[in-house]
Image: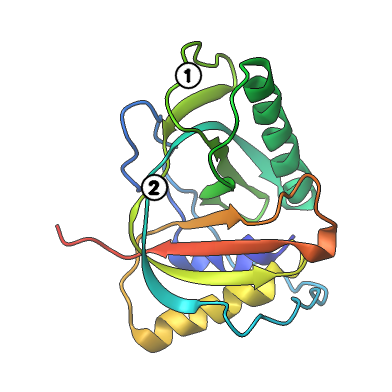
Amino acid sequence: MARLQRTLTAFCIAAAFGLQPLLARAEAPATTTPPPAQTPQATPAPAAPSDPFGEEVTLEAKTFVYMKGKATWETAFETLVDALKSINGYLDKQNIKPSGQAIVIYTETDDAGFRYQAGLPIAEVPKNPPRGDLAVGKSPGGKTVKFVHRGSYDSMDTTYEAITNRLDEKRLETEDMFIEEYVTDPIKTPADKLVVNIYVPLKQQR
């Protein structure tokens, strides 16, 4: 996978998003270098006329059950799907229904792979909080720039390059992270039918 290697690295992905106390911060970002030439990427599906691409919106912070971990680019999508399956398993056992779509936050990236936090929002903190690899916290919130991707995970490289160009054109100052919200369930949706909202948080005044 070349997607985050080439494009998210341009924004120095890091865990700088000030999550609530229940959510542990990720480690400092790794230093990255430009990756070698890649094979051509899949082409995203055409955007719908109503899809926002660079629209400023306020993202609501949500309580969510999440798993953090790391993956190689070759196994990126499979790793994220497995993480969401584990979270679904916990929620099913606790008889808790997700209150929204799956969220993936990229917290560190280098040529070999990336670190992530993948989760599902819930209405309130569960009475029996998860243990082990799972935790409960608050997802990022605040002013963001919203984009939409349609198509496969592999084709998101092209979308992220367009996002980079749009942010450069608008000369927007952004925080060092990206948030993906999966409008379609990545566990059940055919690979080429994904719909993903991508949020880029705007830098807050200090």
Pointer 1: residues within 10 angstroms few (<14), some, or many (20+)? some
In the picture of the structure, the residue carrying the numbered disc 1 is 126
Q: Position of residue 206 (x, y in %)?
A: 14, 57
Disc 1 secondary structure class: loop
Residue depicted at 57% across the width and 77% down the height: 51
Comparing 169 with 103, the one in front is: 103
Comparing 198 with 189, the one in front is: 189
Check the image and report above or below for 24 versus 95. Answer: below
Say which quarter of the image contains residue 49: bottom right
Check the image and report above or below for 141 versus 65. Answer: below
Which of the marked residues, 1 or 2, is nearer the chain's N terminus? Answer: 1
188 to the left or right of 89:
right
Q: How far apart are the two marked residues, 1 and 2, measured between alpha carbons?
A: 19 Å
What's under tag 1, amino acid-wise? Pro
Check the image and report above or below for 142 versus 160. Answer: above
What's under tag 2, amino acid-wise? Pro
14 to the left or right of 112:
left
Number of the front mark, 1 or 2: 1
Q: Position of residue 92 (x, y in %)?
A: 68, 22
Disc 2 secondary structure class: loop
Comparing 96 with 188, the one in front is: 96
CB of mark 1 within 8 Å of CB of mark 2?
no
In the picture of the structure, the residue carrying the numbered disc 2 is 140
Image disc number at residue 167: none
Residue depicted at 56% across the width and 47% down the height: 103
Q: Position of residue 10 (x, y in %)?
A: 49, 68
